[in-house]
Image (tube, helix red, strand yellow):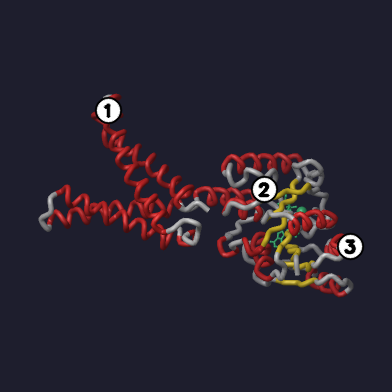
Amino acid sequence: MDVTIIVPTFNESLNVEELITRTEAAVGQRAVEIVFVDDSNDETPQVIEEAAARHAIPVRLIHRDVPVDGLGGAVLEGFRVANGSWAVVMDGDLQHPPEMLPRLIDTALGGDANIVAGSRFVEGGSAEGLSDGLRVFLSHFGNGITKLLFPRKLKNSTDPMSGFFAVKLDELDIAALKPRGFKILLEILCRKQMRLAEVPATLAPRGGGESKADIKQVWRLTRQIVELRIGRMPGFALIGFVGGVANLIIMGLLQHAGWNYIEAASAAAAITIVGNFIAQEHWLYHDLRAGARKLWWRFGHSAGFNAIESAVRTFVLFAVVELLHLHNHTVLTQGVLLVIGFLLRYAYHERVVYRQ
Ligand code: GDD
Ligand code: MN
């Protein structure tokens, strides 16, 4: 099986028959199956089963009695059960005309991208089906904000909010996805650097029935974006804080045991550097350890950067206090520099030490 077309459905009984018919006609001889992941509380599951029996294309139905994570969770469930090497995600309300499938599938199977997204904003694409001005505005606004926040990961994406895309399943870390709303493509693109290709997509008007999008989805999307952006920062801060406290305790104990304060501080620093690194490796970044870089490379760059950061910070503290005559505000100045240093260390670990 080359491709599994995942169709999330919530009360789409008016659309599924036409969707299967048009999909079957569009994909022709390609090795494709359709998986409906259904959370409906109406007759949609029966309608799907009856329609499937009338068609030759393989159709599976997964009905979730206890839906988890709505549309995003349904797509994830589709990824888990897919037999294809690629998964295509397509809406069940005919807003994504199935006639777009051949171009998407052939670009996926024939190119070297590991994700192919339908875009409304490239030559040949269109968003005619966006029902009102507010949604057009939100859609452009969302695009702009997310591209600002994730310049590198979304560099090649003109439509990260698209719901029509194909992804190569063995390059997807399904366990790492935590869907919060409707925008699963955005999450996939932002979690890991993907090789993206785009094809034009039309967002047609909905078939029958009603949209399930509501203001709650905007809130969920906002939370999703904040979480994706902040990422491991709270964990990184926690390790830094615990390391700092441990450093002081060790220094105190060693001085109590008769060491002089310079020896005690050096030993405490060495112990916390190693301790922080072990915590990063085994807890915070454990999923990225299998990357291209060797353990010693990571340790050298992590500890090296931290050492340079603290030396430079001390020098900057001295320079700033002397030049700006901040002798009455040394603690405040040091506080500001600590925050800046923290952000720099976090950025360096994300972008260099544990770069994906
Ligand atoms: N299984 C399941 N569970 N499916 C759901 C759920 C849910 O809780 N909520 C919605 N769906 C299904 C719908 O049945 C439909 O097939 C598809 O997800 C999209 O939902 P719509 O209600 O039609 O939402 P939309 O038209 O506002 O959103 C579309 O446009 C966006 C682009 O602006 C979707 O295509 C989005 O994926 C897309 O990002
Ligand atoms: Mn829709």
Res 147 quadrant in image: top right
Q: Position of residue 348 (x, y in %)?
A: 44, 46
Residue 14 visible in the picture: no
Q: Position of residue 126 (x, y in %)?
A: 80, 43
Q: Nearer the viewer, mark 1 or mark 2?
A: 2
Give the quadrant of ligand 2: bottom right
Residue at 64% in and 39% down: 144
Q: In this view of the protein, which residue sits in the foreground, 164 or 270?
A: 270
Q: State the residue position of label 1.
A: 326
User: Which three-letter amino acid code belongs to the residue tagged 1?
Assistant: Leu
Res 86 quadrant in image: bottom right
Residue 232 visible in the picture: yes
Tag count: 3
Horizontal arrangement in the rendering, residue 297 relative to residue 181 (left or right): left
Residue at 39% in and 39% down: 340
Q: Classify mark 3: residues with Cα within 10 Å, few (<14), some (14-19) or many (20+).
A: few
Give the secondary structure at mark 2.
Answer: loop
Q: State the residue position of label 3.
A: 25
Kindly report the distance in space between the C-alpha atoms of the residues bearing marks 2 and 3.
28 Å
Kindly report the distance in space between the C-alpha atoms of the residues bearing marks 1 and 3.
75 Å
139 vs 220: above or below: above
Q: State the residue position of label 2.
A: 160
User: Which three-letter amino acid code belongs to the residue tagged 2?
Assistant: Pro
Q: Earlier in the sequence, mark 1 or mark 3?
A: 3
322 vs 346: above or below: above
Horizontal arrangement in the rendering, residue 349 relative to residue 188 (left or right): left
Q: In this view of the protein, which residue sits in the foreground, 235 or 155?
A: 155
